[in-house]
Amino acid sequence: MKLIFLFTLTLISVLLKSQDSISTFDKAKFLDDKAIFYDNLSFPRDMAIAGKSGMVVLSFRLNERGILDSLDIVSFSNETILNDVAQVLLSTRNKWTPTYENSKAIPYWYKFIVYYDFIGEVTSTTDAKYPAQTYFEKAEKYYEKEKFDKSLESINKALQLRPYSVDYFKLRYNINTALHLEDEARLDKDAYETLDKNVMEVIDIAAIGIVRTTTTTRSY
């Protein structure tokens, strides 16, 4: 009986160690300067003239060697920006490290998101903020003042515009925790942990409609 008991304890210990090792995950890294994305993506003139914003979400697979070998379209608002984003992403085919799970290189699918934001009239380029950022900053201020209901309202608006933002979900997790909304907080935690693992890059491309100063007015 003692031998069986000792064997059982040893087996449990081995299983627990094995379970701990399964949680090891090392996300792939980009080997080049991320400025390549901003340098090769621009806001389409026709979208700027029409005052339209847009978004492209792509899913791409890195194989065991870190080579980008597959690309899928998740969503897009028009074909022009879809083609631009796809071409830039495909140009990075050999510029990634592998993904590792339990110290073993594995194939893995990541998301690549590009937001195109048309920003209306501003008083200076330094004041230019895309709408989601404005809602997020309002939510932060309300949270700091413990006005949690108003903070939740603002962060929900931000997430409608930026559904792939880790920081936005983290803030809503904190807000829901403060409001004792445990189920909602748990869902937000799951969301930001999943996004942090699966979203490789979020790029913001903005166009300013009009910059008004005391002496001049410039249009796009």
Image (tube, rainbow, N blue to C red):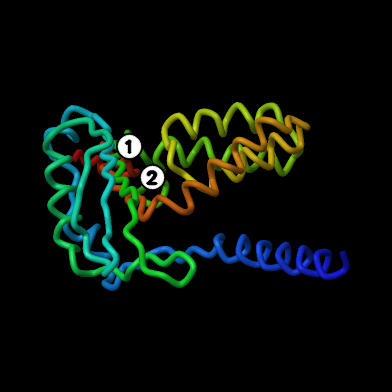
Front residue of 191/62: it is 62
Asked if residue 185 lies left or right of residue 208, the reply is: right
Residue 53: numbered disc: none
What type is the residue that disc 1 sits on?
A: Ile
On screen, residue 68 versus residue 188, left or right, reads: left
Asked if the residue at tag 2 contacts the one at tag 1, i.e. Cβ–Cβ closer than 8 Å, the answer is yes
Toward which corner of the image does residue 46 lie, by quadrant? top left
Residue at image point 32% right, 59% down: 107
Quadrant housing the C terminus: top left
Front residue of this view, candidates 118 and 180: 180
Q: Residue at x 58, y 66 (%)?
A: 21
Q: Residue furthest front?
A: 1
In this rendering, the answer to whether 153 lies above or below 40 is above
Q: Position of residue 101 (x, y in %)?
A: 45, 64
Mark 1 → mark 2, Cα distance in angstroms: 7 Å
What residue sits right under mark 2 in the picture? Answer: 128
Q: Quadrant of residue 6?
A: bottom right
Q: Nearer the viewer, residue 125 or 155?
A: 155
Question: Quick one: SS at disc 2?
Answer: loop
Q: Earlier in the sequence, mark 1 or mark 2?
A: 1
Nearest the viewer among 51 and 34 is: 34
User: x, y (%) of residue 124?
Assistant: 36, 47
Name above or below for residue 91 compared with residue 213: below
- Is residue 92 shown above or below 199? below
Q: Amino acid at mark 2?
A: Ala
Residue at x 26%, y 61% (from the top left corner): 63
Q: Which residue is mark 1?
A: 119
Q: Residue at x 18, y 63 (%)?
A: 93
Q: Position of residue 74 (x, y in %)?
A: 27, 36
Element class at badge 1: strand
Q: Position of residue 163 (x, y in %)?
A: 44, 36
Q: Quadrant of the N terminus?
A: bottom right
